[in-house]
Image (cartoon, grey):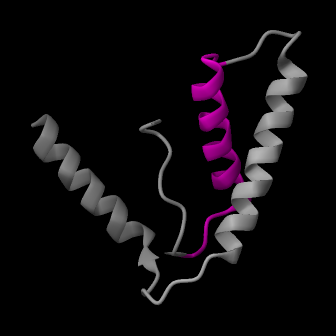
Amino acid sequence: MCRNIKTLFNFDPPATHDEIRDAALQFVRKLSGANKPSKKNEEAFNRAVDTIADAAHEMLHAMETHQHPRNRDEEAAKAKARSALRFA
């Protein structure tokens, strides 16, 4: 799966529309194998991004959890520390 798609559920503050759309774009890029579609395929590509973003938005707002929301800054610091160990 795409390494650039990050978990968007259960964060404080919640995922923004732009973050959800960016994840949908990455997903469609991975499925299509194209970073940027040709003019002929651009409409289908954009329609797929919109459909997936809408479905993801609906899913994220419908899901429930008993866990406390994660802090974005703390999660980013943890990821940076893991990256430093991995690529040191």
Q: Position of residue 12 (x, y in %)?
A: 53, 78
Instruction: State which quadrant residue 26 falls in.
Output: top right
51 relative to 70 in the view: left or right: right
9 relative to 47 in the view: left or right: left
Relative to 14, say whether 65 is above or below: below
Relative to 17, say whether 74 is above or below: below
The secondary structure that dominates the magenta segment is helix
Instruction: State which quadrant residue 28 falls in.
Output: top right
Asked whether 28 falls inside the magenta stretch, the response is: yes
Q: Position of residue 45 (x, y in %)?
A: 80, 26
Relative to 70, say whether 2 is above or below: above
Q: Residue at x 33, y 70 (%)?
A: 74
| Magenta stretch, residue numbers | 12-35
Instruction: State which quadrant residue 63 falls in.
Output: bottom right
49 relative to 32 in the view: left or right: right
- Observer-nearest of 84 and 41: 41
Q: Position of residue 38 (x, y in %)?
A: 79, 9
